[in-house]
Image: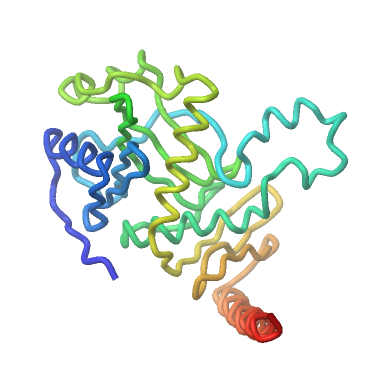
């Protein structure tokens, strides 16, 4: 368990922290982790009092996780044999990102209208680019969000806008892929905590989360109550135990 440090972080401290984690010195207690020259500082904007932690007016930059590259694939539907080919893997495994965020940000709340999780980040790249961004699970699945260069002065205070030197919207395809890979790998370094939330979408509601390391998505339909949620969480336990028994059996056979 990480002993989280809850202190107000000024801009100078933020810049120092993101540089340190980019150089390989993770500080999970401050919600900061890096990977191969990239640094990421995560903030739960609903429980932050820093003036620069703002998510309003951000837009989707690109998909991540299971939905990485889905836009490009959708433009070639004539080459797709099944809709399953549009995603990299079952999107339930993207709940593991939520579990990592729960470890970093224990106050983080999950669930809502087309919103499973949503966090603010400050990012530094190996070549010194630094900018704010958002990481969230919404209508298009797990996604990276951000602002254009023109929008920074309209959204952030001037003293913070001065330290931003680029926008992820201006990244090339290769730069975006490098950033996404680094972010995914950085989060995979973190132990996964249990969580669940009800994700409201056009077709009803879905119970999503992680329990004892097992990611799950269970459709609840349009109506549900706490009894339904407790029942399905117990069902996750049942399947988790069954999976572990099968896994142990395979290990013995091997």
In the picture, measured across the screen, residue 9 lies left or right of residue 45, that is: left
Report which quarter residue 188 is drawn in. Answer: bottom left
In the picture, measured across the screen, residue 107 lies left or right of residue 111, that is: left
Q: Residue furthest front?
A: 254
Locate the C terminus by quadrant. Answer: bottom right
Locate the N terminus by quadrant. Answer: bottom left
Picture residue at 27% right of the left edge, 17% below the top? 153
Count of picture labels: 0
In the picture, measured across the screen, residue 69 lies left or right of residue 74, that is: left
Picture residue at 52% right of the left edge, 39% below the top? 143
Residue 43 seen: yes
In the picture, measured across the screen, residue 76 lies left or right of residue 172, that is: right
Give residue 21's position: percent from left, percent from top. Answer: 25, 44
Residue 32 vertical position relative to residue 60 in the rendered view, above or below? below
Give residue 70's position: percent from left, percent from top. Answer: 67, 35
Give residue 138's position: percent from left, percent from top. Answer: 55, 44
Residue 45 seen: no
Q: How is the image coloured?
A: rainbow
Give residue 224's position: percent from left, percent from top. Answer: 63, 69
């Amino acid at each position: 368990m990480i002993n989280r440090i809850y202190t107000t972080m000024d801009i100078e401290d933020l810049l120092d922290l993101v540089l340190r984690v980019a150089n390989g010195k993770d500080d999970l207690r401050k919600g900061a982790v890096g990977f191969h020259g990239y640094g990421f500082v995560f903030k739960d904007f609903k429980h932050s009092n820093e003036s620069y932690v703002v998510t309003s007016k951000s837009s989707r930059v690109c998909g991540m996780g299971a939905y990485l590259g889905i836009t490009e694939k959708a433009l070639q539907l004539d080459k797709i044999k099944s809709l399953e080919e549009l995603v990299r893997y079952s999107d339930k495994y993207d709940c593991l990102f939520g579990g990592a965020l729960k470890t970093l940000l224990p106050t983080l709340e999950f669930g809502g209208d087309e919103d499973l999780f949503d966090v603010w980040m400050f990012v530094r790249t190996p070549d010194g680019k630094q900018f704010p961004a958002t990481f969230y699970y919404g209508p298009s699945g797990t996604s990276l969000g951000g602002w254009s260069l023109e929008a920074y002065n309209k959204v952030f205070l001037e003293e913070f806008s001065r330290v931003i030197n680029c926008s992820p919207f201006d990244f090339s395809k290769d730069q975006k892929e490098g950033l996404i890979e680094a972010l995914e790998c950085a989060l995979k370094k973190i132990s996964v905590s249990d969580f669940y939330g009800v994700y409201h979408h056009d077709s009803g509601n879905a119970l999503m989360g992680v329990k004892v390391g097992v990611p799950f998505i269970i459709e609840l339909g349009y109506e549900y109550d706490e009894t339904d949620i407790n029942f399905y969480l117990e069902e996750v336990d049942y399947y988790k135990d069954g999976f572990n028994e099968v896994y142990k059996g395979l290990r013995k056979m091997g």
